[in-house]
Amino acid sequence: MAGERKKRILIAKPGLDGHDRGAKVVARALRNAGMEVIYAGLHQTPLQIVNTAVDEDVEAIGLSILSGAHKTIFPKVMSLLKQKGISDILVFGGGTIPKKDWGILKSIGVGEIFPPGSDTREIAAYLYKVL
Amino acid sequence: MNNPDYMEAKKYGEDISLDEELYRNLSGFHIKSLYGPEDIPKFDYGTDLGLPGEYPFTRGIYRTMYRGKPWTIRQLGSLGSPSEANRRIRQLIQMGSTGVSICLDMPTIMGRDSDDPMSEGEVGSCGGVAIDSLEDMRNLLEGLPLDEISINFVSNSQSPVILAMFVAVAGEQGIPLAKLNGTMQNDILKEYQAQKSYYFPPRPSMRLTIDTLRFCSENMPLFNPISISGYHLASAGATPVQELAFTLANGFTYIEEGIKAGLSVDSFAPRLSFFFKAHNDFFENIAKFRAARRIWSRTIREKYKAEDPRSWRFRVHTQTSGSSLAAQEPENNIMRVTIQALSAVLAGTQSLHTNAFDEAFSIPTPRSEKLALRAQQIIARESGVINTVDPLGGSYYIEALTNEMESVSYEYFREIENLGGVISAIEKGFYQSAIADSAFKYQEEIEKKKRIVVGLNEFVTDEEMDIELREPDPEFEKQKVADLTALKKNRDLNVVKTCLSEVRQVIQGSDNVMPVLIKAVKSRVTLGEIINVMRDIFGEFREESIY
Amino acid sequence: MSKLFNEDVVEEITRKGDRWQQSTGHGGKANDREFRTLSGISVEPVYTPEHTADMDYLRDLGFPGEPPFVRGVHPTMYRERAWTMRQLAGYGPPEETNKRYKLLLSEGATGINGIFDYPTLRGYDSTDPLARADCGRGGVAIDTLEDMRILFDGIPLEKVSSSLVTCQPICNITVQSMYFANARNRGVPLDKLTGTSQNDFLMETCMATAPGVLPPKASFKLSCDAIEYCTKHAPRWNPISFAGYNYRESGCTADQEVAFVIANAIACSEEMVRRGLDVDDFAPRLSFFMNGQSDFFEEIAKYRAARRVWYRVMKERFKAKNPRSLAFRFHVQTAGVALTAQQPLNNIARSAYHALSAALGGAQSVHIDGYDEALCIPTELSSITALRCNQILQLETRVTNTVDPLGGSYFVEALTSKLEEKILMLLEEMDGLGGIVKATETGWIHGKIADAAYEYQNDIETGKMPVVGVNCYRMDDEVLPIELFEVPETAKVQEKRLKRIKKERSDSEVRRALDAISRCCDEDGNLMEVIVESVQSLVTEGEITEVLKDKYGVWNPPLF
């Protein structure tokens, strides 16, 4: 469709951990799949992430978490979005997040979780489907 | 049962063979169907290989290698509180481990005390040890024979403080510094390139590294002050030849910085050691180590004019590839680890860590850790591969691959030099983009099935698996914070202040920071307090993201 | 001449090597003990061009797929066709084993490796009083053609290659006949069948010896009958697989393992030529079954040496012309004897590198033992894990990227030549004794193996040969952490089926069948020709055995 804007996605790596291989690979794969990707870089706080998301006018935020801090970080991001009255930004995630925690995350509104070994094409397909 | 038909249609091997592109190793070299004498045309035995323990050390850095002394079995001891870690380390030693690696928790890695607001929820994370004060180091090392076993601190940006604490505890135990064996990872360059646990900009960080180097070369002749690590580069996505070239270039940078700081090359080069990853491509991995030995010795001798043969030796610790392990059918990882370990041994490693088979999805149990140790013992005691040095030497394939590894490395050296050296290359984002390129390419190959991981993209079973995390224990964190609060209350604040201002003064000048650090930690100044002073002066580093 | 280094270069290297050796010191710690391979070959501290100075590239190595085949039997080896992953499977009654076959095939196995229970291997029926306790143990129980039908039910015989581990010729002659008869009944022509039967007379007379077996000559004759039959009717079937694996499990050394299989193959070839067959008609179908033992490099060198020796034997003694006759093709199974019941998961590490050495040695197919091998029949988990090991080697380690990756290694080449030399000496010795059948009759082979086995055990007990978890790094509190496999009830199932069959079959047909076999023995005809027909009458394996033992007598192998 003429004039349709590219999907804008923010990829972020919250927490102290610096293992950014996965986040960067996903960022590039989504870019190659035709999306506009903003990579927020390392050591981002939930507030910084939400602010960037607003400033950059993104449709989705992807959080990469390998440190086990997912149960703290996702709820923080979700509640910050709520506080700002934002309901149209999808939050999804990846990294070492046990399946047993997926239910909790999804119940607070997280869209989908992509564990290690996920195919990047599936991530792109998912985003095109839901956005 | 669809399989015979499936196999028939697929013809298994044939399907794979048709695509010549598939015959590339992880570094992207094209692999020929056969190697013969014509593939090493200018081969000169004396110049290219020589004899073990002799220049250029291609065949091994010691004359008798494992006939004389087996490699050090060094397992990563992880775990929670310093005293719990101490118990696990003792266990590993009792099972036949001759060295041990200690990793730190995320706050310590990031230079924060347990009571720092940024540390909340991460104290004791990832199975690492939380080190705030000398008290913690004392609990960690209690009763360990520090002059007999070799301890490897997986410590980087915070190394000057950790080293100060180690020195202080050894002093309390009455062990002379000259007898201290062990390693401090202390490789700041790869932090900017891959691991990303840095605080300050590269140049002040390098200055701190050189201070530790000088301290160790003057006082701790058996201690390895820097373990130049390719492992993390490889984990971040670097190919084996990038791992090789970037690691060596980092090594040369430490040499140059040391020389610039007025140290004689032979006073510290013998104590630099390396850390490589044993990845899945068996022969490529072996060639990587052999090329590393040859390049290191030639460069150190010819370019940096080292005269002590010990300076020419490329000593290396190896860990099997955690990232090659699959969560699916975890028993398969025992084989992966075994084959990788075997390749490291055939490559002539000095020490080896084998990963636990269940670590891709859970917390290794004492049983899985023991199995990992056993794989090394089986190779050492049963396989007979230790009977002769460099058993693959002369193989046309291995020699050709070693040569190619070497020549591609020199191309990378030139590229880095053109960027103004390693630190400039970091500042210009060279490593970030080179490594991101490789990581992306690898992922693409997995998705297109050009690379196979059994259980992941081939022979996939729908086994229900879940990841199990080492969740930080909130009780432990509470206790740790309480202990730290008590410690901070019970010390002489004036002394603390004096120590911190001494630290500030010294780092603003050019004297070695180690003596004031040792004094400070003895006065119960904490790691976080010291790093905060340094942050104040040096500033914090932010990288520009490239992907 | 295609020497790799000219003389003055070798001389210089030798001189430097000597100096190095001197300065390294013979009294040093490294030489406290002697370094030897598992088979006792002394190993130098370092190998250089000095040790391969006599090697002529074209004469001694050549190119893969070309004489002397040292670098491999195919030009492109695993690049074109990965080794076959053949996992042994067999236990209980045939319906149970059938399920396991299907599981392995659906998980990517590319062939079937059928093992049989002890009564079947020894020629007894499941109902024989001697058999009952062992029924279904160590393999699947087969009594009649009906069992064979059940065993391969639903498995496409024309597509799947089946290896029948019918070790003893007395078992093979009947069980292989049943396999062929079953194929014919299903409309699959014999010339479409691919597979292998073990059929090795040394298995009957030397290995795991029991009193009252067929005498060596008779056992050898049965073995040769099957070879002759297949050469004429089932040209894609390998009618014999010389069981070096079992010789090695019984305790012999690497060089003996190769020398015995080759001596055995020489005897068979001589007999086939005597029966009027052309060497190039049967030799391409002779195959070898080798053991992947624990000395990594010795095993690699062993496979390479075997190829060189076999090439010369077939070329020089038998004037074979077909390249397939000249190429030593072999299957490897990782050594069961090297596995331990203590800390069983350690066996995964062992088998992984045993299998790697087979791959680096150029094997055509590989079976990897289950880690619970020393304790029980492999469970589903352990046999899938073993299969995965093969897949990881092929797909992840990239050792298949190039042919004979170790070719040129001074150590591997020197060890290959050393093993070749020892194998040739043994072959010469056996020639002097009148060949392997004679050497068996006199007990010479038994003696050789017993000596080596004694030494092996002695080395473990004295700690000279470390075995982790057994004589070092023991864990006394180790509890069995794995699930053991329970053999399903077999004797009753087989007894019931056999009773029904005996009631339903025609007694006169059975009588006629047994008479035909008996007559064939008297006329010294080819027994397989007769037995393939006989089994249609549902005559049992035990009934056939009785006739054979009646005609040929029994033999008690020498005990040591």
Image (spheres, coloured by chain):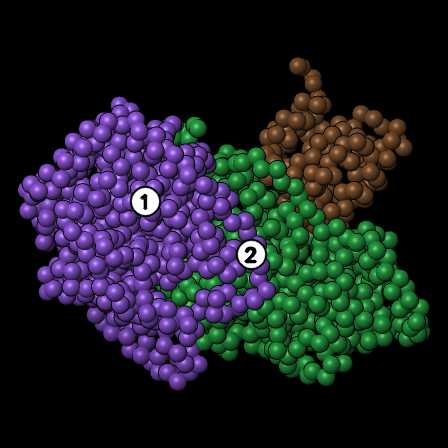
Chain colours: A brown, B green, C purple
Q: Position of residue B317 (x, y in %)?
A: 55, 64
Camera-side mark, 1 or 2:
1
| Residue at the (36%, 77%) spot, across then down | C34
Q: Position of residue C128 (x, y in %)?
A: 32, 44
Above/below status of A92 relative to C218 = above
Disc 2 crowd rating (10 Å Cα; few below 14, some 14-19, many 20+) is few
Numbered disc total:
2
Disc 1 crowd rating (10 Å Cα; few below 14, some 14-19, many 20+) is few
Q: Chain of mark 2?
A: C
Specify whether C358 is left or right of B86.
left
Q: Chain of mark 1?
A: C
Query: Which of these two is toward me, B284 or B146?
Result: B146
Instruction: Give the residue pinned by disc 1.
Output: C128
| Residue at the (39%, 44%) spot, across then down | C136
| Residue at the (76%, 62%) spot, across then down | B81
Above/below status of B269 relative to A9 = below
Q: SS of the residue at dot 2?
A: loop
Name the image quarter holding the C terminus of chain C.
bottom left
Name the image quarter holding the N terminus of chain C.
bottom left
The answer, for residue B124, to whether it is visible in the render is yes
Q: Position of residue C521 (x, y in %)?
A: 11, 42
The answer, for residue B534, to whether it is visible in the render is no
Q: SS of the residue at dot 1?
A: loop
User: Which amino acid lies under the numbered mark 1 shown in the image of this protein?
Assistant: Asp
**Which dot marks residue C480?**
2
Sequence-first disc among 1 and 2: 1
**Residue B253 is drawn in which quadrant?**
bottom right
Q: Position of residue B17 (x, y in %)?
A: 36, 37
